[in-house]
Structures are given as C-alpha cells and as structure tokens.
Amino acid sequence: MTETPNAPDTPAAANFVRDVVTADLAAGTFQRVQTRFPPEPNGYLHIGHAKAVSVDFGIAEEFGGVCMLRFDDTNPITEETEYVDAIVDDIRWLGFEPAAVVYASDYFEQLYQWAEHLVEHGLAYVDDQDSETIRAQRGGYGKPGVESPFRSRSVAENLDLLRRMRAGEFPDSARVLRAKIDMQHENMQFRDPVMYRIRHEHHHRTGDDWCIYPTYDWAHGQSDAIEGVTHSLCSLEFDSHRPLYDWYLAHLPLPSDQPRQTEFARLELTHTITSKRKLLQLINDGIVEGWDDPRLPTLRALRRRGYPATAIRAFCDFIGVAKTNSRHQIELLEWFIRNELNRTALRRMAVLRPVRLRITNWPEGRVEQVELSNNPENPADGTRLAEFTGELYIEADDFMAEAPPKYYRLTPGAEVRLRGAYFVRCTGYETDADGNVTEVLCTYDPETQGGQAPDGRKVKATIHWVSTAHAVDIEARLYSRLFTAEVPGERTGDPFDDLYRDSRTVVAGKAEAALAEVTPGQVVQFERLGYFAADHDLPGVFHRTVGLKDEWANVQKRAR
C-alpha cells in the first residue's frame, strides 16, 4: 500500500521501539541499553538503511546507551573491504559514531565452540544431503517436513564429522551442520535450520583460517549475546526468525543476559527500488554510471546529489517507527531536503539554456557591480557583488517572440526587472537561418537602478541573468524519476518495465563568477531553477538536488 503521511508541520509519527525500551527499563528487564547496526559488507548502504541506522543509533543515544557497528561478514563470496570502508564512512556522514566497529568473524571461534555444545547435547547434527534435497524435505506451510536420514547420527559421529568439516577434509557443499529442532513445526525456521556450510573461500579478514562459515541465523543472536546487546532491532522480514533467535540463545551458556529481538517496518519510497541485485543490474546495463550515480537511492548517490544528512535524519524521525510496512512518498523526503537547503544554501545566478540579451543603449565598456543577497533566509550570510554589463545571458525560456496570454516575461514591447539591476524593455530580437532566436534586444531605464522605478510603475516578472564577459562555464545534470511508476513493477512484476531511460539531461550553462568559488559537494541555489550540488571530483559539474517547487503539497492535494 502507499501511505500518505501528514504534512511536515504536524507532530512526528510514533516510535513503538522507544516505548518497548522505556517499558523494559521501567520493569528492570534491562539496566542499560545497547544496540547494534549489523550490515553485511556486500554492497553500499541505501536510503532504507538510513532508517535502520537512525533507529539503532538513535535509540541508544536517546537512552544514554551505546550502539555498535557490527559487520555480518559470514559469506566470504560476496564481501569486500571496499564495502566495509564505505559503510563506516556513510554512517559517519549521517552523523553517528559507533561505540566500536566489530565483525561477526571476530566470534568465529566462539560460534564454533557453541556449535559443538549443541552437538554434544543432541541439538545439532551433520547432514550429508545437498541443499536442494534439504530444501525439498523442509516441506511448506500445510505440508509436512521429512526428516533427514542422517538426523539420528550419534553425538560422537557428529562431533567427528564437524571437526573434519572445520579441518577442510570435505569439498564445498558436501556436508552442513543443522540444528535438530522439529521438522513438523508450523514455523518453517524451526525445521532443522542450517548452521554451517562448507565454503573454501578466502575471507577478507580471516584469510584461509576457516572453510566452514556460519549462517546469518546462527551468527546473529549469538553475536548479540557476546557483545552484550540488550535490544536487537531488525527489519520486519525477520519477524519469523525471532523464535529461532530465542531458541538458540536459550540452549547456550551465555556470558550475559539474553538480548531481545524487536522488528520494525522498513523504509520504502515511491519511484524507488533498493534491491542490491536490481541496482547492480542498472549499473551493469549502463543505465546508470555506478553506485554513486545521483539517480540511485544509495547514500553515496544521495550524498553526491547534495542531500543533506541532517535532512535525511529529520525525515526518518518524522515518519516514525511502525510495526507494519508501508511506502512513503518520495516527495515528502524531498520536502525535508528542500526545507533544509532553503535555510542553508547560498544563492547564485546561473543560466542553463542561455540566449544573449543585448542592451542597446548601455554605455560601451561600462561595468557595474550589483549587490545581491547570499541567502535572504539568513542575513548573516551577507552579500556578494556580481558584474552587470550591456551584454548578458538569460534563460531561453524567459523570452518568447510570440507570447501566449499571461506570459509576463520578455516579449517584444514587454518590460521586466533584471534581478537586482534595472528594468529593461524588449525592442526586438535576431534569429539564425533556422529561425532560432540568437539575441534579444532591449533598452534599459537608468532611473530603475536596484530594480525600483521612481515613477512607481510595476513589472510582473523578475528574471535572472549573467554577464557574458564574466560568466563561467558549467555543466548541469538534471534528473527525473528513474522509475515512472510509484511502485516499480507493481503492474507487470518487473520494475524495469517502469524504467525511464532518459532520466538524466546534461546541459552546458553559464554562471556568475562567484560560482567558481564553491567547494566540492557544496549545494547552492541556482536562483529560480533549483538546488544544485557541486560534484566532488568533476570541476564545473553540478547535479540538481531538488527543484524549487514543493511537489509534496500537490501530493497532499491529490490525496484529499
């Protein structure tokens, strides 16, 4: 379903996890609060992870506790140090500092010893069947499971086989270690889940020390217990895993109190996919340029596009923490981005589709300095000077040779205000052989310096401009929704059926000289055009972060 939240000026949504932690502390269930954020280092964090990060770190911070960053590095085939470094960097960019950075691989020896403990107590066994057979024997909802023929092995035989598995005696997938629980249980997670599998793969931290690796379910709760986690906060798809989480912990000699797992709804946005597999397909197919392409929902991409981390966190706080999944409008996220940038971004003038404007009565060679506000929302940002001359660039859209009714910008005979400078009246225009406008001709009124007429006459439009002699070249990259449907793939089952392949437009523009002074990553408002972020690596390249128009207001109107 698509959720239509309240307007951003209403109270934030509830956070039921906060209520759970409050109740636990009041009841004495726990005396402190410790959480963890446990990503697998097999890709880059995306906007959905931003919510999980905000919940895990935010709850710990709110209750005076600590939050660990623990990498779930139990699958050496897909994990790389590159992703570890990127995840640490993204979390710090969001404004959180882990109490410690740890790894599930730190606990491989303890996990193995606990596996032997379960074998010794008749609660785990080695199975020689292949994965397809094991999967088929698990049955399904309403369909009984089939016990493995190796389920009745003796403790001694299971211990011997497990130790030989660890020693590397068997090839990949030859055997697995399974918990012995209940093959008829209504919860499929209890039907003798796999705990260890054989994989002769080089691990990014442990090298070749191990050739058996724990599954997520076996490593997760036990790692929580080793670290002293009190509240293990997971996304909703792990709801059915919680009984298994508790079962493992209940049958082990834990070093501290048993942690509690609580599940909350993931963050999903309209017009967005977050599947790592599908995002990788976009990259491999050349639809986008990489994991930091500004059209993607990865934190790397959002950062490059100019999304402020503080605005992302404010959005996550606003939507709250719920027990059921829902999809939030991307326009609401953009409202938070726009609201933050309106307060913080400096203003600059840029012309993205330039056409020349020549003031025919301007004194030859004359250059004036026009004082402009850097940010009217924050007077402390001061002012800047921009050069004004008789030859300017204006937006092509700000002139029409034959204008429709209610077109108030430049057209023959019409008068407009040039931002911070003078009134000009259009006297004509010139075209090329194909009829394209190449130059707009105007006269200026020297009595209107600063944009005010002494006789009190008014104009209905103010347009921006850039002096041709002082302009700097820029490249602006303009983005549309990567997926046209609110829920990509909802109609056909394939999100790529809703892919908009022309979602990026690149234009060569002109800008006032002050734009050359921005720092990599800095976001500025191109007046009348939107917010643009300077690329981190490509000088002169600017990515449109969001436009100036509040699309969230329109979404609310449609919802009503």
Image (tube, rainbow, N blue to C red):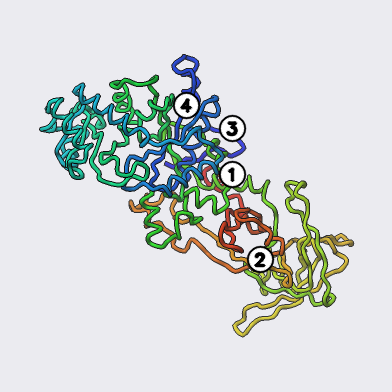
Distance in Å between CA atoms under marks 1 and 3? 14 Å
Which residue shows up at 30% across the image and 32% down it? 218
Which mark is nearer the camera, 4 or 3? Answer: 4
Q: Which residue is disc 1 drawn over?
A: 336
In the figure, is residue 204 to the left or right of 165? right
The residue closer to the viewer here, 50 or 544, is 50
Question: Residue 131's x, y, as percent?
Answer: 19, 42
Mark 1 or mark 4: whose residue is earlier in sequence: 4
| Residue type at the position of mark 4 | Gln
Which residue shows up at 46% across the image and 29% down it? 35
Mark 1 or mark 3: whose residue is earlier in sequence: 3
In this orientation, does residue 219 appear?
yes
Question: Residue 491's x, y, as percent?
Answer: 36, 52
Badge 2 crowding class, 10 Å Cα cut-off, few under 14, some 14 to 19, many 20 or more, is many
Q: Which residue is disc 4 drawn over?
A: 34
Badge 3 crowding class, 10 Å Cα cut-off, few under 14, some 14 to 19, many 20 or more, is few
In the figure, is residue 221 to the left or right of 200? right
Distance in Å between CA atoms under marks 2 and 3? 39 Å
